[in-house]
Structure formats: C-alpha cells, structure tokens
Amino acid sequence: MKFSNKIVLFLVIAFTSVFSFKTAAQKNKVYNQMTLDELLDIDVVVTASKKPEDLFETPLSTTIIKKEEIEKSGVTSIPEALRLAQGVIVREITPGNFDVHIRGYDNITKNIYLKQPYNTTTLVMIDYRVVYSYFSGGTLWESFPIDLNDVERIEVVRGPASALYGPNAVTGVINIITSHANKKGKNINVNSKFGTNQAKKATVNVGYNWNGKTKLSFSGNFNERKRFDTKYYDFNKKAYTNIDELSLTVQPIKDVVTNESWNFKDYQKELGAYYDEDLSLRKIGGNIFFLHNFSEQSNIDIAVGAQKAQSQKSGYLNLATVLSEYESESFYVNSRFKHKNINGQFSVNSGHNYSNHKFNSYKFTTVEGSLEYNKQFKSFSVRPGVGYKYLSYNSPLTYKEPSNFGELNYQFKDEARVANVYSAFVLSEWKPTSKLRLIGAARMDKFNINKNWFANYEVAGTYRLNKNNLLRAVYSRANKSPFFFDSYLNTSIYLNYDVPTGDGTTYLSVPSSYNVSGNVDLKYPTITNQEIGWRKKINSKLNLDIEVFYSQVDNFVNPNVYVNNTVSQQLDNMGQPVGMPAIDIEGNVLFENYDLEAEQFGAGFTLNYEASNKFKANVFGTIQKTNISGRKNIDYKETGRESYVTTGGAYVSETNYFMNPIEWGNKVTPTFFGGFSINYIPTNKWGFSTDGYIYSDQKFEDINYYYLINESQNISGLNQMKINSTIVLNAKTSFRINKNTTTNLTLKNILGKHTEYGFADSIGRQLFIGLNWNL
C-alpha cells in the first residue's frame, strides 16, 4: 500500500468518528462562567509548570495520557502507550523493546560506536525521579520496575524543558505518574494477558487506604515476549543470516606476533557472548508505595522497588550486528515530601547493565536530591531551588589502563568514575491581567568532571482571548549533559588493513593500531526552540490544539580520527628499493566538538472529541522537516606530509590525515507521524476500542568506518535500509462478566508484519486474551 493511500486510510478512520457532529460558537467569560460539568471536565497537568493547572492553560506543548485511555486501548507497555500522544516517535526494535523520540532529531546522538538512532535527548521521569543512564545517555525502558498497572497518567511535554528539570530534557520530558489505593479500604487488582507467539504478561496491585490519609500498596509485574525472527543482520553480507553465520564488521587482531584476526565464532566463544535467539524481552519488577498526609499542606510519599530484565535490542560495540543481548538488575528508593511552601525529593538508584559482549557493561549508583521553595504574591510567584547529584559508573571501557578489543581481558576493577553535580534554578510567574500569564525559568548545572557550565532557560506566555481560545508562545534553550562514555572512554584496537598496492589489483595486509579516547571538557548538543500555539474549544465536545515550532541544534559531539601513515623502504647504494616496503598505520580517535548544525521546522495538531462517556475519539499528527549543515558527510583531509632518508639508508614517507567517520543524515526522522484512538462503550458490559499509529518513510544507514582508507570505499561499506510508511493498527474488545471481573480480546498489528527499526526485527500480528479482576 502506498503511503498516500495509508494517509487516506488513516484520516478516514480517524475523522469519520470525530466529525460526526456540528460545531457551535460560544462567547462566555473564562472560569467564572463555566458550567459545573465544564469545570469537572478540566484535565489537570503538573509537569509543564511544576504545579497543578488546567491543561488548556499550560504554556508548553503538553499531552496527558490518562489511565482510562491506556486501559481502553490495545497497548501493552509504557513506551507503546506513548503512541497515544502527539509528537512522539515510537519504534518497536524487537517485540516489547522500543526506541522513543520527541519530535525527532533522531540522528544527532550517534557516534563512532553508536551508529543507529538511540534517544539521549528526552528526559524520562517516574514520579519526578529521573530514570536516565548517564553512562552513554538514554532511557532503558525495559529496566523500569513499574508497569502499566502502576500508571495513573503520563504527561508528555514537547520542546526543551531543561530549565525546569535539568540537562537532557532537550527535546522534551516524559513524566510517568503513579497512583495506588485510591478508594478507601482494600484495593486489589490482578491483570493477566496471554498472546500468540508465546507472549505472557501479568500484573498485580494490592493496597489499603486508611480514609484517604494513609495509603500502602504493593505491586508486581512480569512480561515475556518472543521474537518473530531468529536471524540477525550481517553488515558485511548486507543481509539477514543465522547467528552462527555472522561475521565481524571489525576484526581485531588477537595475536600481534602472527597478526591473526578474530572471527565471529571464536570471538563469541571467548567472550561468552551467546544469544537466547528466541527471546526478545523478559522482565520482572516489584514496588512498594507509601503515602501519608499529615495535613492538607504536609505529606510524605515514599516508593521502593527493584527489577530484573533480559532483552535483545539495538546497542553498540557489538562488532557484528545491530542487536545485543542485555541483562539489567537494579533497585531504587524515591521519597518526596511537601510542607506548606517547601517541596523536596531524594532518590537512590543502583544496579548494573550487562551486555553479552562483556566490555559493553557497567555498574552504577546515582543519588539525587532537590529542595524548592514556592512563594506566592498577589499576581506574582517565585519558586527557587537547589539540587545535587552523585553519579558513579564503573565500566571496563573507562579505566585508566586502556581496554583492548583484541585481548578480551575484561574484568571489573575498583575504578568507578564519579561525578558530582550542583544545580540552582528558579521558576517565576506573573499574571498582570486575568488573561495574560508570563512564565520565566532559568537553571544552572555544574558537573565537576567538565569545565563548562550548563545553562538553560525558558520564557513562555499565554493569552486567553476568552474561555474557548488561548494563544501561547515559548522561547527556550536546553542542553545535554556530560556522559561517562564520552568523557572517559579509553580503549585500543589492533586491526589488519587491506591496503591497495600500486597496480590497484592486489592488496597488502597491514597491521594498524588505534587508541580511542574520551574528552572531559566537551560542550554538548544544545537546542534553542521557538514555538507558538493555539488552543480552541470548538464546542463542549470538541477541542483543537495546534502548535508550530522551529529549533536549532549546535555543539555536536563527534569522534574524529587522526591517522599517521608511515611507509619505509630500504634503499641500496644506488638508491634503488630493496625488498618489500614496511607500512605502519597508527591512529587516535578523539571525541571532540564538531562543525555541524541542524534545524527543524514543524507543526502539530491534536483534535479531541468527547460525545459522551460512551464515545470518545481523537486524532493527532506532526509534520516536520530537518536540515543539517556543516561537515555532514564522511570526509578526509590531509594535514601533513613529510619525506626523508634515514642514516640507515631507508626512505621514509609520513602522511598525516584527519577523517570524519560519521555520515550525518536527516532521513531517519519521518516527515509525518501521528495517530488516533476511538473508544465506544455501548452498554455497561461491552467496550470497543481501536487505535492507530502512522509514520512516513524512513531510511537507516550504516558505514563500517574502521576500514575506510579513502573516499572510494564509502559506497562499498555503506548499508542502507528503507523503513516503509506504516500504520500500526490495534483493536480491543472488552466484556464485563460481573462488577469485579472483565475479560478482553486484543488484536495488535492488524495490518500484518512490518519493520519499524533499521537492521532489526520484524514485528508481527498478535492476538492477546486478557482477564482483569478488581476488588
């Protein structure tokens, strides 16, 4: 099916339900003339301005995914639920494992080791606790201790938000808010699903509510998904193959005397890097939640939990294929308190993330604390605060003695890298009139491992024309933080290069050595964003939210390659060559800031229709265009050449050159992405829903940079995979057996098998049968 036809199908399904009504103009004042039903129907959001407020009033681009929407939809995981929000790109890498981006910029985070999209620019939080890996950046979705059964709502803020929540909220923030034991007395919920392709999922919540003052809950979850494919992509063969037929894209020398190189089977055996070929995801998690309200103005909220997960997903430093197998295990403690105008939070998270390729593993401990004070005046409020982070990451890749990819002697040492981060921030709000609202925020973060200060700011305003129309504008700046991988990477590798000889038909195998090093004083990608928006209540049943945005990114980080190529030829007394020339290639790969910039133009919309409690529908979409300028292509630059004759009678020629080994492109981010959902409850027993997610064409690329000797080899080393435009369509039917028990039937990926992430797995059609019991 062509993409244009898919767009038509998408719009027909979505708009058929939404436009089955007539719009009516309303001319009333704002809240004081709202009806009781309108006031009760207000959606409250917290993440956009750090306080509860009407979603319609928030100055930032924000979407709330409510528990009710999640339960009625066909989604089965937290990252998949993000497909219900505008402006979010969600790709399923392997069944149950996802890559998530807000608005795009998918390619700006890749580097010499991480060559496929991997989101390090969106900050994810669980109850305001940052769940982010400071080793190489990003969110490990499979390592969440919570699951959908714990979620009360998900708040998605599009656009830079580092002024509110710190570095790495570059393209936005996702805040997952939990809630438990909401009704007085006993609260029990048990949910189970079994699906085709051996899928299993079970969750349980048990809690008690003492008259709304004290709540105690226990939750647990288990999830297992199998792959639809058992083959892996081989970059040398440019095709999928069996695991035992894979070849190494990079063949390190294992014996510097004989120059013998590793092959995949021996390398895998030496590392113990075996795969559970059928398994995509297996995770188990448990949590305890405690909340006590001392008074209306004072409370304490404590959560503890742990998880263990095994997954196959996109990784790096695999040296063979895109997919790596990971095993993660961690525990956390999160405490929040409020007393009058003071808010505080303290959290600890510790564990490990092990790859089947042992060198790509690390242990970690993070400790974070913050304290804020909110002072309210008549028409002005100010909220200053301070924060502190202790970050400890232990990895063989960052030790003082370089790790060698050929020797494979990877053992954990007592050499954890540690960072201390100090933060200060302020959020202020001024309402000069009942219709105009102005917000300003600024934040400064200092990492003791980096000489640079990380400054972020935000200026936003809203103007309420009337109760049905609101205009808003935002100007903001946000940056990524230093990572231990970029800062302290310390590795070496020995390779055999096949260098063409003078006749161009034969090759000479030449040993070469490279040292790969991080840089502690890098600047990190920084985004400056401008956007305007309009929210419109068309009538009591229909709302429209439109946004237009423009952003720029600079301070790209790139591992540049510096090579010294030395050719030595012994000469006789007549100056004629004697024997074979000796060739020596040495190089240094260094993380540096790079001459590259990107800009993005885009627009998004959300249209919500609520006919009644029985019928609800929405449709949303984002269209964007990303441009990249600067040194975006792989290139070579000779930086020096010298020839001389040694006292021993050898002619020596030394050539130095610089290489950018990364091909930066803008075709990974789809031009259009969006979705819709329809929920219909004809009776108090039956419920029907369908949801769809659509994206346009994408192109994934990979180049084997290790063997680039000259520009002519770019094409032969290039792998490309086009991801065709797709509609991911789900449908769910539920039936209430009695007041406590509901059964459901969910069909996922109705339109059939497809691939969403380059060089990874196909995602097939699945049928789930579920049972839910509440008390």
Image (cartoon, rainbow, N blue to C red):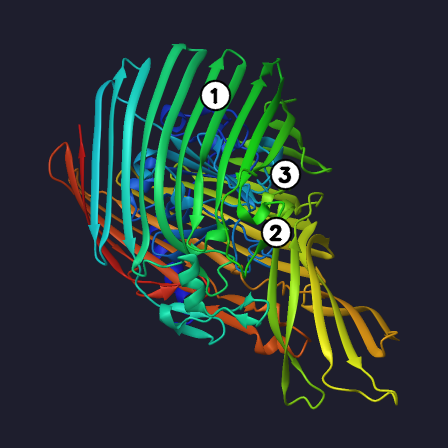
Judge by depth and name the residue closer to the eye, 17 or 255: 255
- The kind of residue tagged 2 is Pro
- The kind of secondary structure element at disc 1 is helix
Instruction: Tell me which amino acid carries mark 3.
Output: Val
Whether tag 1 and tag 2 are in contact, CB under 8 A, the answer is: no
Identify the image quadrant of residue 265.
Answer: bottom left
Quick check: 95 above or below 635? above
Residue underneath mark 3: 474
Which one is closest to the eye, mark 1 or mark 2?
A: 2
User: Quick one: label 3, few (<14), some, or many (20+) residues within 10 Å?
Assistant: many
Tag in front: 1 or 3 = 3
The mark lying in front, picked from 3 and 2, is 2
Decide if residue 644 is in sight here: yes
Can you say whether 578 is above or below 75 in the image?
A: below
Helix, strand or loop for disc 2: loop
Residue 402, numbered label: 2
**Quadrant housing the C terminus:** top left
Sequence-wise first label, 1 or 3:
1
Expressed as whole percent of the image width and height from the top left, the position of residue 657 reads: 76, 68
- Asked whether disc 1 touches disc 3, contact meaning CB atoms under 8 Å apart, the reply is no
Q: What residue appears at the point 59 percent right and 14 percent down from the top-left corner?
A: 376
Where disc 3 sits, the SS reads: strand
Q: Quadrant of residue 252?
A: bottom right
> What's the distance in space between the residues labelled 1 and 3, CA to CA?
27 Å
Check the picture and name the quadrant holding the N terminus. bottom left
Q: Which mark is residue 32?
A: 1
x, y percent for residue 713: 63, 77
